[in-house]
Amino acid sequence: MFKALVLRKDGDRVQAAVEQLDEAQLPEGDVTIAVEHSTLNYKDGLIIGNKAPLVRSYPHVPGIDLAGRVIESRHEGFEPGDPVLLTGWGVGERHWGGHAERARVKGEWLVPLPDGWSTRQAMAVGTAGFTAMLAIMALEEHGLEPGRGEVLVTGGAGGVGSIAIAVLARLGHQVTVSTGRPETHDYLRLLGATTVIDRAELSEPASRPLEAARFAGCVDAVGGTTLARVLGQLRQGCSVAAVGNAGGNELRATVLPFLLRGVNLLGIDSVYCPMERRKLAWQRLARDLELRTLDDMIETARLEELPRLSGAILAGQVRGRVVVDPTD
């Protein structure tokens, strides 16, 4: 028997409660994992709160990230005792996820835990940090390098933003952060932000399609009007990596930034990212993220707290990263 956060649906209503399950109830897969830590991401908040049609069948165990140790394996790449982590691949959406003491998944979805990392540290990074690293890699591949100018991070107090700030600052970039939460300014500067601006500066539609060229790059977790404003403020040949839609799905912009300044809009998919690039991103995180920085980002939570915290993360009230300990 093991403990899990289980979602059950009654009509249009989804209820979340911690239950005891039997390992025989786990879904199909060739690797069984004793989960030591998981996370709470924005997508987890949508799933637990039933705010988006992401889950296809119930009962369901959420949690799009997990890290732990293999206890059974029929996959040639993993043996009992191996420390592993998992992000993406529809786990926590179509497949039972990491908000439990046990998980059974496909071995082809797993990444070995980076050397010297704990499972808690890996989940302090999780999908959010992995996505941030993919965004930075894409920006670098399109010309971003230290010394070119300000790099903007929108939604800076969230999980993606926090890791992006820390990595960009360590790489030597001048990091500007937008946030609507004044109480987080000291936290953002501690992570490495050099300038903090109010999100209101980017949340209203622009009066013209091209504004003063300011930013050498951007990691955007907001989307909507904010992304449209950023496109009009990028410098010649620079790029924005779009990683989220907290500010809305619609993008009302013109083609002029692309035609007159040659800017690039880079979409980041962390769910089905190919394994080789996935491993490279984790190698970069192991190299370019100071693990001690994670201590300032982490809030630890029990499974019983996740229904409450899921509402908080959707309301933008969670700072940094929530690491879930399913064994507590």
Image: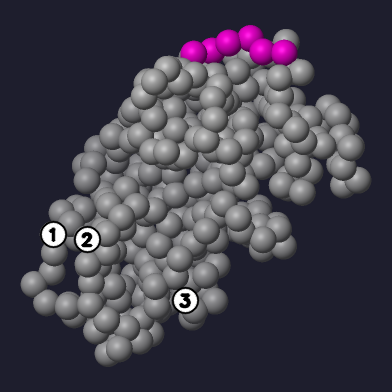
- Residue 291 seen by the camera: no
Identify the mark nearer the N-term, 3 or 1: 3
- The residue that disc 1 covers is 204
- The residue at the far front in this view is 11
Tell me the amino acid under the disc marked 2.
Answer: Thr
Q: Amino acid at mark 3?
A: Leu
Mark 2 and mark 1: Cα distance apart in space:
7 Å
What residue is shown at x 44% (from left), y 49% (from top)?
160
Give the SS element for disc 2: helix
- 204 relative to 179 in the view: left or right: left
Q: Position of residue 215 (x, y in %)?
A: 31, 73
Label 3 or label 2, whichever comes before in sequence order: 3
Which corner quadrant holds the N terminus? top right
Q: Which mark identifies residue 144?
A: 3
Magenta span:
17-22
Which residue extends farthest bottom? 260
Q: Magenta residues: mostly which secondary structure?
A: strand
Q: Secondary structure at mark 3?
A: loop
Decide which of tag 2 and tag 1 comes sooner along the chain. 1
Residue 106 pos. (x, y %): 75, 41
